[in-house]
C-alpha cells in the first residue's frame, strides 16, 4: 500500500513594506520573514516533510520564501513558478492542484492569503476546520488526501496532519 498523497501549504514569509512605492508583486521578504522561513526550513528537515514538487506564486516574496527553505528541500525537486498562483483565490488554487499528475505524491504549494487559508480549511472536514483559525505569514499546513487522485481534491477530502506557525515553532524550541 502506498502512502497517501500529501499537500504542504505554505504562506510566504512576512514581506517588507519599507518602500511603499514597490509594486505588490515585487515586495521582498522582510528580515522577520527570512527568520520565519529559517524556522520553517528546520521544521521541514526535522519532520522529514519532503515535497516531490513545489508550486510557487510568481511574487518576489513567495520566490524568496522558496529560496530560504531550499536547504530543506531535495536539491533536484522541481520548482514551478506560476503567475496564476499570484494572489489566487481558493477556486484557482484548487483547480491547479486538481491538474497534478497522480504520480506526484507530495506537493508544496507556496502562496498568499486569503486563498491559502481558505484552501487549507476548506479541504478539511468541517470538524477539523477550527484547527486552522488563522493562517499567518510563513504558516505551514500539512494535509493528507483521503481521496485517491489529485483530480478528486475538494471540500472535506483531506485530514490535517499538522499546522505550525513560526511563533509556535519558536516557542517550542525555547522550552
Image (tube, grey):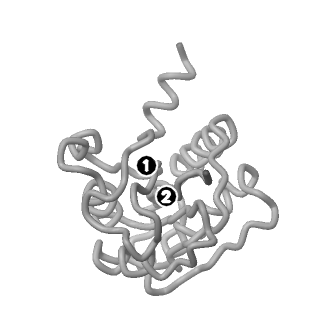
Residue 103's disc number: none
Which residue is label 2 attached to?
7
Gap between marks 1 and 2, in whole Å? 8 Å
Q: Is residue 11 above or below residue 130?
A: below
Q: Position of residue 13 (x, y in %)?
A: 49, 55
Q: Position of residue 48 (x, y in %)?
A: 67, 42
Horizontal side of 26 relative to 2 (left or right) equals left
Which of the pair 43/15 is nearer the observer?
A: 43
Task: Find the residue positioned furthest to the right.
Answer: 75
Which of the pair 129/42 is nearer the observer?
A: 129
Horizontal side of 51 relative to 92 (left or right) equals right
Task: Find the residue positioned furthest to the front.
Answer: 1
Given contact means CB atoms under 8 Å apart, are the residues at marks 1 and 2 in contact?
Answer: yes
Which of the pair 89/149 is nearer the observer?
A: 149
Q: Is residue 69 above or below residue 98?
A: above
Task: Find the residue positioned furthest to the top.
Answer: 175
Task: Find the residue positioned furthest to the left.
Answer: 126
Q: Give the mark, 1 or 2, whose residue is nearer the N terminus.
A: 2
Horizontal side of 164 relative to 67 (left or right) equals left
Q: Position of residue 168 (x, y in %)?
A: 44, 31
* Residue that appears at 38% across and 75% down: 93
Q: Is residue 2 above or below residue 95?
A: above
For label 1, the SS is strand
The mark total stands at 2
* Residue that appears at 62% across and 54% down: 2
For label 2, the SS is strand
- Eye-nearest disc, 1 or 2: 2
Which of the pair 77/161 is nearer the observer?
A: 161
Query: Mark 2, residues whose alpha carbon is within 10 Å: few (<14), some, or many (≥20)?
Result: many
Query: Mark 1, residues whose alpha carbon is within 10 Å: few (<14), some, or many (≥20)?
Result: many
Which residue is label 1 attached to?
141
Q: Position of residue 33 (x, y in %)?
A: 52, 51
Amino acid at each position: 500500500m502506498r502512502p497517501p498523497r500529501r499537500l504542504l501549504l505554505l504562506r510566504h514569509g512576512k514581506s517588507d513594506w519599507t518602500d511603499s512605492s514597490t509594486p505588490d508583486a515585487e515586495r521582498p521578504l522582510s528580515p522577520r520573514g527570512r527568520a520565519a522561513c529559517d524556522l520553517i526550513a528546520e521544521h521541514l528537515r526535522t519532520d522529514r516533510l519532503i515535497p516531490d514538487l513545489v508550486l510557487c506564486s510568481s511574487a518576489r516574496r513567495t520566490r524568496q520564501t522558496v529560496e530560504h527553505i531550499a536547504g530543506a528541500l531535495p536539491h533536484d525537486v522541481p520548482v514551478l513558478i506560476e503567475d496564476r498562483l499570484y494572489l489566487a483565490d481558493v477556486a484557482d488554487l484548487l483547480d491547479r492542484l486538481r491538474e497534478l499528475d497522480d504520480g506526484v505524491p507530495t506537493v508544496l504549494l507556496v502562496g498568499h492569503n486569503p486563498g491559502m487559508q481558505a484552501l487549507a480549511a476548506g479541504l478539511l472536514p468541517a470538524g477539523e476546520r477550527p484547527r486552522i483559525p488563522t493562517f499567518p505569514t510563513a504558516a505551514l499546513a500539512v494535509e493528507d488526501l483521503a481521496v485517491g487522485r489529485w483530480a478528486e481534491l475538494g471540500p472535506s477530502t483531506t485530514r490535517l496532519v499538522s499546522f505550525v506557525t513560526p511563533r509556535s515553532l519558536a516557542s517550542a524550541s525555547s522550552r
